Amino acid sequence: MKSGAQSTISKPSPTAHAGTECPKCHEQSIVRHTDGIYYCLSCDFKRNLSQKDKKDSPQGPGGFVAFLGLLWLLVLILL
């Protein structure tokens, strides 16, 4: 054993989430590595849940404005 202070690298220990099934391999082997990052121990699945998916972000007023425009055209045609 060496004398003096030994430096150890602290790595976050994976935390198992009981009952969490991997969407790719369907095994219950999902672990949390760091805040919001989850890995599957059985396959190469990885997901960062701390960032919003683009599909979850709002689209803005574009769709609503297009709907109102089409509704307005429909009203004009019916008159």
Image (cartoon, rainbow, N blue to C red):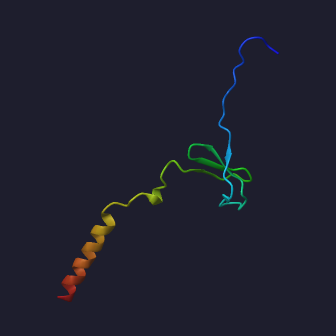
Report the residue that reaches farthest toward the left: 79
| Residue 6 coordinates in the image, percent (x, y) | 72, 18
- If the image is split into quadrants, where does the C terminus sit? bottom left
- If the image is split into quadrants, where does the N terminus sit? top right
Where is residue 18, by image quadrant? bottom right
Q: How many labels does the image show?
A: 0
| Residue 70 coordinates in the image, percent (x, y) | 27, 77
**Residue visible at 66% across and 49% down?**
39
**Residue visible at 21% across and 83% down?**
75
Q: Is residue 67 above or below residue 29?
A: below
**Residue visible at 68% across and 39% down?**
13
Where is residue 59, by image quadrant? bottom left
| Residue 48 coordinates in the image, percent (x, y) | 56, 49
Report the residue that reaches farthest toward the front: 18
Q: Is residue 39 above or below residue 75?
A: above
**Residue visible at 29% across and 70% down?**
66
Report the residue that reaches farthest toward the bottom: 78
| Residue 37 coordinates in the image, percent (x, y) | 59, 46
Report the residue that reaches farthest toward the right: 1
Whether residue 49 sits left or right of residue 20 in the image: it is left
Whether residue 42 sits left or right of residue 48 in the image: it is right
Where is residue 61, by image quadrant? bottom left
Whether residue 28 sits left or right of residue 68 in the image: it is right
Whether residue 57 sits left or right of residue 4 in the image: it is left
